[in-house]
Image (spheres, rainbow, N blue to C red):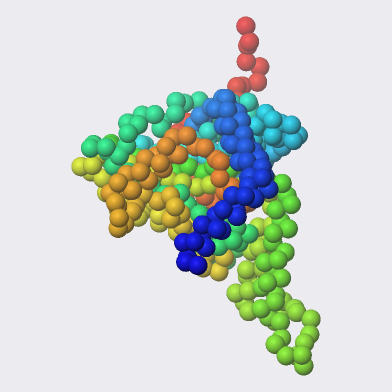
Amino acid sequence: MTFFENFKIAIQFIADLGWLWLPPVLAIAFFYSWMYYIQRVYWQGIAWTNLEIKPPREIDRTPKIMEQVFAGCWGIFGTVATKYQKYVKGIIQDYLVAEIVCIGGEIHFFLRIPTKFRNFIESQIYSQYPQAEIREVDDYVWNVPPDVPNKNWDLWGAKLKLAKDEVYPIRTYAQQLDVITPADSPSFIDPLSTLMEVMGRLQPQEQIWIQMLFRPIADDWVEKVKPVVEDIMGKAKPTTAAEAAPITIAMLSPGQREILTLLEQKASKKAYQAKVQFTYLGRREIFSMANVGATFGYFNQFASLNTNSLRPDPLLITKANYLFAKQRKIYRQRKLFRFMRQRSFWDKGYILNIEELASLFHFPTTAVKAPMTPWLETKKAEPPIGLPTT
């Protein structure tokens, strides 16, 4: 029998068994279609509020205080309480969006939150930054033509993913302390310094959007750390029976010991599923890829060769090569631009704990010297005691 005859017989055999495999296939297809529909209906009904935060100038502490803000915001966990809410009403776990945005050289710190959490989120910020100013603003994403890229505007951007397994931490602010004289006076080198310098130099028709979407997850994610630790310890296991002995920390290399310490530190704090994405937009006559490289430089500060780093996701980066490269690039640009506008969070994301989030998004400390840093110039004060109220 020829190949084609054998192929025809195989196809016929599969078709004859359709009564066996078709029902479960249709059931699975219906389930995913149903979840896709009801979750998007629920998401489209969420009322969002866009808040701009102007931090006080006198922030002389590390992002540890922002870490406490994220720890408090974890309290929105549990918006899906029952299976009925999840599978019938389509309710999804609520999430927040932290954004660093520059529009024509003006820098802004935004939080996009479900409106129902506004008082709760504001209280978390004021608890750590009592001198900050928080106000509701219009959404900046609608001030750019909806068909970017076009003959006047160009953009470059990417969704970022972790280089290694999500249990490995990125480099955090705690590892960016520079010890100066005297030895007991640590000085924090704020990674925002370079970003503020880059953003402050943008021309009026240039913009940079950095968005960090994050939703709280249950603490049982730490169970993922155990097999990774066991794998690291296993690499130090003696290769011969004569050398067999219990594995101890002393048997590990300095690099392996550091990794274990960082894994333990990451697993010791509350965590979120997160997604980071950014884009640089500009009029074609002034569009400069140098600003893309400078933005990547900001994220490179959180890279550690021993543990983890953020890098572009090849499935959502605005470049294409070879066949139909121009058309595919435009498709990717418009797809990313749509995601940046919507801030949808359907994908799984990756785990970042509150220390990692605070490293990526915090308010500038006094170490930042860039002139365009958006500090609140006036200080709020309490009214004097005994002030007449009539």
What residue lies at 52% left-to-right and 35% top-to-bottom? 111
Q: Is residue 300 left or right of residue 356?
A: left
The single residue placed furthest to the front in the displayed view is 1
Image quadrant in which the C terminus is located: top right
The one of 238 and 378 positioned closer to us in this rendering? 238
* Residue 288 or residue 137, whichever sits in front: 288
Q: Residue 376 location in percent, x, y?
A: 47, 34
Q: Is residue 29 visible?
A: yes
Picture quarter containing residue 238?
bottom right
Outermost residue, left side: 285
230 in relation to 201, above or below: below
Work out whether residue 116 or residue 240 is closer to the camera in this orientation and state it.
Answer: 240
Q: Residue furthest bottom?
A: 242
| Picture layout, residue 303 above or below residue 151 | below
Residue 347 drawn at (x, y percent): 56, 45
**Residue sitting at 44 percent across and 39 percent down?**
340
Residue at the right extreme of this rendering: 246
**Residue at 58% across / 32% down in the picture?**
37
* Label total for image: 0
Provide residue 256's location: percent of width, then percent of height. 63, 74
Q: Which residue occupies 56% across, 58% down?
A: 10
Q: Is residue 167 left or right of residue 296?
A: right
Quadrant assignment, res 42 = top right
64 left or right of 367 in image: right
Q: Is residue 196 visible?
A: no
Q: Pick whichever, 381 or 303, lies toward us.
A: 303
Q: Position of residue 159 (x, y in %)?
A: 46, 49
